[in-house]
Amino acid sequence: MDDLRKRALDYHQFPIPGKLSVDSSKPCATQDDLSLAYTPGVAEPVREIHADPANAYKYTNKGNLVAVITDGTAVLGLGDMGALASKPVMEGKAVLFKRFAGIDVFDIEINAKTPDEFIQTVVNISPTFGGINLEDIAAPHCFYIENELKKRLDIPVFHDDQHGTAVIVAAALLNALELQGKTLAAVKIVFLGAGAAGCSCAKLLKLMGATNITMVDRSGVLDTDRSDLHENNRELAVAPSNQKALADVMPGADVFIGVSAKNALDASLLKDMANNPIVFALANPDPELLPSLAHAVRDDLIMATGRSDFPNQVNNALCFPYLFRGALDAKAKQITEKMKIAAAKALSALAREPVPAEVLQAYQLTALSFGKDYIIPKPFDPRLMARVSSAVAEAAK
C-alpha cells in the first residue's frame, strides 16, 4: 500500500500537477489565424448564436463538452471530503470521458451551503455545456439536486453514482441470471445499501421486470412501518413483517447486491441462499465480502465486485462515457429510462460475443469467454463505443 500511495501521488504530481490540460482545436500561428480565432472574426459566430441558440452546437464545442460537477459530500468510499479534495476524482472522470468516448470535460467543484445554492450555480453555468454529469453528492440531496436540474435544464443531466451503477448492475445481472438458469421476473433479490446507488439499481431492475426486491440499510429492512425513510427509498419499502434484519431475508435469496461497506456481508449468510446464487459485493475499495470467502462457502455462485483485480468488475466506466456519447450524438435533451435500459442490454449482449485479441493483450490473458468469470465486458474493449453509444442514440430517438 505504501508503494501504491507513492506511485499514485507521483502520477498526479509529475511531470505537471493534475491530469488535465486544455488544447486548442484550431491553429493560431499567424496574424490571419488570430483574426479568425478572436477579434474581428469571432464576432460572426457570436451573431449567429445570438440569432439562433442552436448554432452554439455548430460553432462552439458545446455539443461535445460535459461538466463533471460535485460538492464533494460523498467522495468514493471516503465520505464528505469537501469540494477541493474531490478535484482529483473529477479530473479522473474527465480522463475517462476523453479516453473512452472522445468527450471533453470541465471538472467543476462547488462550495455550496445548500442544495438550492448548488442547483442555482449549475443552472447559471449550464449554457457552456452539452451535458451535466453529477458526481459524488451524498443522498438524499443528490436525488433532489438531479430532479430539480432535470426540470430546469434542456440538456442531459445524469448522476453517475446512481444511474451509471444501475446500468452496469443490470447488464451484469442479466448475464449472471442466464448462466444460473434464472429470470429477472422470478428471482428474489436482496439489496444491502439503500442510498443513491442502491435505490437507483433497484428502480431500474423493477422497470426491467424484477418483482421481488427487499432493501436493507443500517437500520434493517425497509418496510412501510419505518418513519425514517425519504421520498426516494420509501417507494421501495415492503410490507411489514417479522423479517427486520439482513439475516432474516437472505434465506432463499437468489441475488444479493451490496452497495454498502467493507465486510458488511457475513459469509455464513450465503449458506441459506437459493441454489446457484448471485452475489454482487460492490462496496469500494473493499467489497462487502471477498470472493475467496464467498467461494469457500458456495461453489455454485457467480460473484462480481467493483475491483479490477477480481473477475467481473462492475465498473461505471462501462457506462457513462458511452451513455453521454449517444446522448450528445442524438442531441438528446435528457437521459431517459429507455436509454439506460438500451445501454444495459447492449453491454449484456457484448459480453456474450467473442473477445477481441486487443482486450486479451490489455489484460495479459490468453483466453476469455462468456461464463461465470466473464459476465460483463472489459473497460478497454474497443467495441463499447460503437455498440453502447449507438444503442443509446437509437433509444433517444
Image (spheres, rainbow, N blue to C red):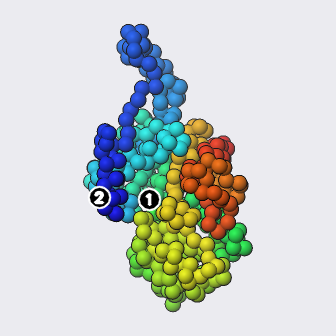
- Report the residue marked by disc 2: 81
Percent across and percent down for residue 239 are 55, 81
Q: Do we see residue 341 in this rendering?
A: no
Q: Nearer the viewer, residue 354 or 208?
A: 354
Q: Residues within 10 Å of mark 2 (few under 14, many from 20)?
A: some
**Depth check, front residue: 14 or 217:** 14
Q: Are marks 2 and 1 in contact (CB under 8 Å)?
A: no
Residue topped by disc 1: 143
Q: Look at 48% across and 54% down and name the residue there.
A: 160
Q: Give the mark nearer the N terminus: 2 vs 1.
A: 2
| Residue found at x 58% / y 87% | 272
Image quarter hosting the C terminus: top right
In the current view of this chain or complex, which residue is farthest to the bottom?
A: 242
Is 47 situated above or below 193? above
Between label 2 and label 1, give the one nearer the viewer: 2
Q: Which mark is residue 156?
A: none
Element class at badge 1: helix
Vertically, is 205 above or below 135?
below
Q: Nearer the viewer, residue 384 or 321?
A: 384
**Three-letter code for the amino acid on which mark 1 is drawn:** Phe
Residue at 54% from the left image edge and 62% from the top image edge? 313
Lateral position of residue 27 relative to residue 396, left or right: left
Residue drawn at x 67%, y 53% is 355
Q: Nearer the viewer, residue 48 or 205?
A: 205
Residue lying at the far top in this picture: please name it: 32
User: In terms of image quadrants, where is residue 95?
Assistant: top left
Question: Which amino acid is tagged 2?
Answer: Met
